Amino acid sequence: MDIQPAPLEKAKLTKLGISFDALSRYDVICLPENVFQTEKAEDLHDADDSIHLAKLLKASDVRCATALDLGLDVPFLERRSSDIWLGVVWLGEHVVLPVVIGVIVKLITSKQDKKSSDRVTPTVHLDLYIERVPNVVTLSYKGDGKTLAKVLKSIVPEKEAP
C-alpha cells in the first residue's frame, strides 16, 4: 500500500512541495512537527527526536522517510528541555504497525529514563496518522510516556508486537 494522505493533508503537503511519487516509496514518513500548521516550506522545522526516530525505524528495516528524503531542506530544533518531540509520524503500510509502535515505545522509554528525575516527567509530543483505508486514524498526544506506551501497545494485538 502506498502512503496516500487524506485530501486536506494531501493538499497541504503538495503546497509545501512534497511529491507524492516520493511518498509511494515509503511505509512511514516522519514529518516536521509543524507541517500542517505552516503555509511555507521555509517555516518548517524538525525536532531532533523525530530525526532519531526515523533513524531507528530505518535500522529496523522499515522504509521510512524524513522531510529531507522527500526533497525538503528543513532545519531541526535541538531542544534543551526534558520533553520528547516526535513530530508527525504518518504510517501508510499497516503491516509495519507493530514494528513502528515497538520502536516508538522503546525510544520514549529510553529517553524518559535518561531525561527524567524525581521532579520532572518528560512530556511526549506525537501526532500519529495511521491509514486504514478508506480512512485515516489520527492520534495527537501530549502527555507522559508511560500512558502513551500503554495507548500504543493497545493498538497492536499482543501476538503482533515485536
Image: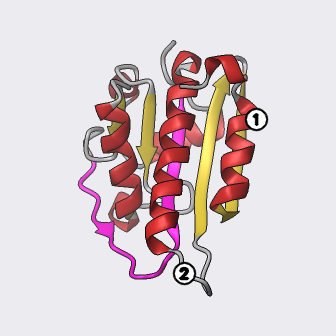
The residue at 23%/54% (across/down) is 73
Q: Residues within 10 Å of mark 2 (few under 14, many from 20)?
A: few
The Cα–Cα distance between marks 1 and 2, rounded to whole angstroms, is: 27 Å
Q: Position of residue 142 (x, y in %)?
A: 68, 64
Residue 43: where, in percent of width, then height?
39, 67
On the image, numbered disc 2 is attached to which residue? 117
Task: Residue 20 in the image: state x and y as whole percent.
Answer: 40, 27
Q: Which residue is mark 1?
A: 154
**Residue drawn at (47%, 43%) of the image:** 13
Report the amino acid beneath label 2. Answer: Ser
Based on the displayed image, in which of its 4 quarters is residue 44 positioned?
bottom left
Q: Residue at x 39, y 82 (%)?
A: 80
141 or 144, which is in the foreground?
144
Residue 37, magenta (yes or no): no
Q: Is residue 137 above or below residue 25?
A: below
Q: Is residue 107 left or right of residue 68?
A: right
- Tell me the SS state at disc 1: helix
Instruction: Please tell me which residue lies in front, 15 or 67.
Output: 67
* CB contact under 8 Å: marks 1 and 2: no
Secondary element under disc 2, as helix, strand or loop, is loop
Specify few, some or many for label 1: CA neighbours under 10 Å numbering under 14, 14-19, or 20 or more.
few
* 95 shown above or below 3: above
Range drawn in magenta: 72-91
Looking at the picture, the colour scheme in use is: secondary structure
